[in-house]
Image (tube, helix red, strand yellow):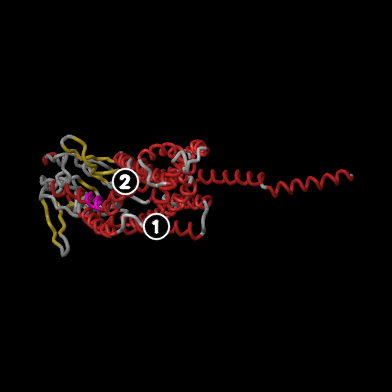
Amino acid sequence: MIGCGAILVALAGLLMALPHFISEPYRFDNTSPGGINLTSKDPRWVGAWWLGFLISAGVVALAAIPYFFFPREMPKEKHELRFRRRVLAVSASPVSKGEDSSSEQSTEASPEKKAGLAQIAPNLTAVQFIKVFPRVLLRTLRHPIFLLVVLSQVCTSSMVAGMATFLPKFLERQFSVTASFANLLIGCVTIPLAIMGIVMGGFLVKRLRLGPMRCSILCLLGMLFCLLLSLPLFFMGCSTHHIAGIIHQPGAQPGLERFPGCMEPCSCPSDDFNPVCEPSSRVEYLTPCHAGCTSRMVQEALDKSQVFYTNCSCVAGGSPVLAGSCDSACSHLVLPFMILVGLGATLASVTHTPSFMLILRGVKKEDKTLAVGIQFMLQRVLAWMPSPVIHGTAIDTTCVHWAQSCGRRAVCRYYDNDLLRNRFIGLQFFFKTSSLACFALILAILRQQNKEEGTKATVSSPGLQQQLLASGREKKPEESRV
């Protein structure tokens, strides 16, 4: 079954790459003077987006081959399964070995046997599973530790889902890096550190033999330091540079505002997008037409060619403009930013194994399998599905210029970088704070339970009661002597 599932995943990867081969070729706007010379830094650059799906599908298909050589059932599991089926058959029968007197007892104890049905036979029939599932589900969801751990994992998964979906786009906009370099940074920094955090959490649980109380403390500390590391991220970035006609930075040199009628003779279409940058003042124009340029010049170099547009009437001094968007002034902050993100991912991943142990040690033995299934189901329904939508909606609210296609809003061309950074990192901060609050409540509940258990043990201890009785008997003779 595992091998068949892996093959299905590989086929899904092939289907994801299929639109590239059946869709129409990419169309470019050639209305700007000299056409369009795209580079990997251009926001319109698409690249071989389908190639990663093909490579991943091939790797998954190769990894699935060894699973087809495994036996259908392991030898030890086969004997254990037969034994459990016999126990199930005996426990389900109302009369055992012709004893009529025991039939009434077995009928009365049937609810208890049904409650332990998941533990006795893991391969329940459909009817048995339907009878057991509602009761076990309700009992599991009413468990406070289980519910809080799942909520904390939902918050952490929401943070990861948003980061995995939109972090490359965030890096492109904030630090003017290419999409390929942004994904390379994520794959080389964040993912290995997250894996290291999961391994470290499992090592600490096993090495220190952490109980539920200490597991909750470890989760609390890991999420607390992860939250503290995210605070500097709010200040690591730059504002959006001056874009003529769209964004004007205070103190910047005016662009179109200085020459209001400079591009009227050009009749520039409003939906064109072929950005050019004036290097000295770092003013960006939507197209060379919007800059009032009339000629194009190509400067050849050893590794690449550079395109310039000259005779620009809308540029101060008529200086030439460079093809492409203006680079961010904070490009040097991309590595420190990714290091902080990677360290935060490490600390958040440390909580993975301890939180999983809290679930396994908190619920009843017969409910563990179902509890784990409910946990992963809630994570996907409450985190992995809505989180990208929430992050995407928050990012769309920071857009300052939308492209139009057939009279409708299409793709965002420019964002308010300060607003984008605050809202994107703010969402991450919110999910981390929620997860921290859940772990704090778990720790408080576990401490309260330990106090109650200690009180019960003190009252019900026979040795302590004998000592109290003995001390009372000794006090009575002394009082009588007095």
Report which residue position mark 1 lands on: 76
Using the image, tell me which numbered label, if any, was put on residue 381. none
Q: Is residue 28 visible to the viewer in this orientation of the structure?
A: no
Kind of residue at badge 1 = Lys
Residue 449 location in percent, x, y? 57, 44
The one nearer the camera, 432 or 277, is 432
Residue 162 on the magenta span? no
Which residue has dot 2 on it? 417
Residue 259: give x, y in percent of width and height. Answer: 19, 42
Helix or strand or loop: what does disc 1 sit on? helix
Q: Residue furthest right?
A: 482
The kind of secondary structure element at disc 2 is helix
In terms of depth relative to the viewer, which is nearer, 288 or 26?
A: 26
Q: Nearer the viewer, mark 1 or mark 2?
A: 1
Amino acid type shown at disc 2? Asn
Quadrant of the image containing the C terminus: top right
Query: Please, which residue is most extreme toward the front here?
Result: 98
Classify mark 2: residues with Cα within 10 Å, few (<14), some (14-19) or many (20+): many
Q: Tell me if I can see residue 259 in this picture.
A: yes
Q: Residue at 20% across / 46% down in the picture? A: 285
Q: What stretch is highlighted in magenta?
A: 7-12
Give the left or right position of residue 117, taking residue 167 as reference.
right
Image spot of residue 455 (x, y percent): 64, 44
Cα distance in 3D space between marks 1 and 2: 60 Å
Q: How crowded is mark 1: few (under 14 residues within 10 Å), some or many (20 or more)?
A: few
Q: Nearer the viewer, residue 20 or 33?
A: 20
Q: Position of residue 291 (x, y in %)?
A: 17, 46
